[in-house]
Amino acid sequence: MCNVEYSANGSTGSEESDAAQAAIRPDDAGDRVRGIFGDCDAGDWRGCQPAGAEAGPAAGCDEYYCAEREAASENASAQNQNSFVLRYGLKRADYDLLSRTIPTVLQAVPIREITKACRYLHREMNCRIVGCTPEYLDMNHLELAQGRFISDKDRREKTNVCVLAAQTAEELFQYQDPIGQSVKIADRRYAVVGVTSAREASAAIGGSMSGQEYNKDIYIPLETMRVRMGDLDIDRRQGSFSAEEVELNQITLTISDVDQVVPTAGVIRESLQGTHKSGR
């Protein structure tokens, strides 16, 4: 399995065992795109080398990342110095473009992430709220300990349901069964329909991307997140104010064949550079 990860201003099961994945993640609120190639197993990015390449990092990979990161940071500063709202990330239009126009893409999975205080009775903790689709479970090698995961029906009906990660369930409910109970996220309640088993964090990519921690998550339908929380996240604290506007944090693409990963990555990069440079 070979994964290609891209960032634009601001991972899924497959029909074939040798299918490859391409993930798109935000980076420094810039509208440039960077690429990282990883020869890896079980969805963890472990280097900077396309599958089948000779040993060692892919030529120019680290240099390309650093240059793009710097450019993205400068661009973000220029865009936001006169605004109280930090706008970055991928667009729903990006998801439509990539999922509908690239023949080698078998599946596209959009993801939105946000950190919120979550409460059950007197217990409270900060959680990563993940707006996702049913494919997220297999994509991240998660397993259910209880109940079920997000369903297509939940998405269509925009229901207030959630699935708790292992540590989230333990801290909020301790010795109680969370299934059928509700947790409060911001000012709304979400019925607990499932709990995932504990999962080790995914590996970081050579200092360029942090690893993913899954055990303090809460998963809700992507469409529910959009209508209940919106794209604008405002954080008011004593003496400070911040606001971010993000439509999607990540899109994961399943590519038809491992040999098509690098060519498809080039198409993805050009598509996103074109749409974000034009301001669409």
Image (tube, rainbow, N blue to C red):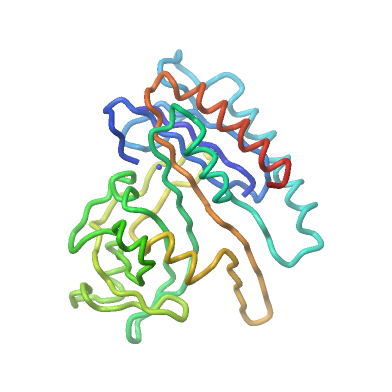
Looking at the image, is 160 positioned above or below residue 19? below
Residue drawn at 30 percent across, 25 percent down: 18
> Residue, x 32% and y 67% (percent of image)?
162
| Residue 188 drawn at (x, y percent) | 42, 79
Looking at the image, which is closer to me, 223 or 257? Answer: 223
The reply, left or right, for residue 200 in relation to residue 115 is: left
Q: Is residue 128 above or below residue 253?
A: below
State the image quarter where residue 276 is shown. top right
Quadrant in the picture for residue 183: bottom left
Q: Is residue 226 above or below residue 72?
A: below
> Which one is in front, 273 or 64?
273
Horizontal and vertical percent position of residue 114: 50, 63
| Residue at left offset 21%, top offset 56% | 144
Q: Going by the picture, which residue comes out furthest to the bottom? A: 122
Quadrant of res 189:
bottom left
Return the x and y of residue 59 as percentages of the image width and height: 58, 19
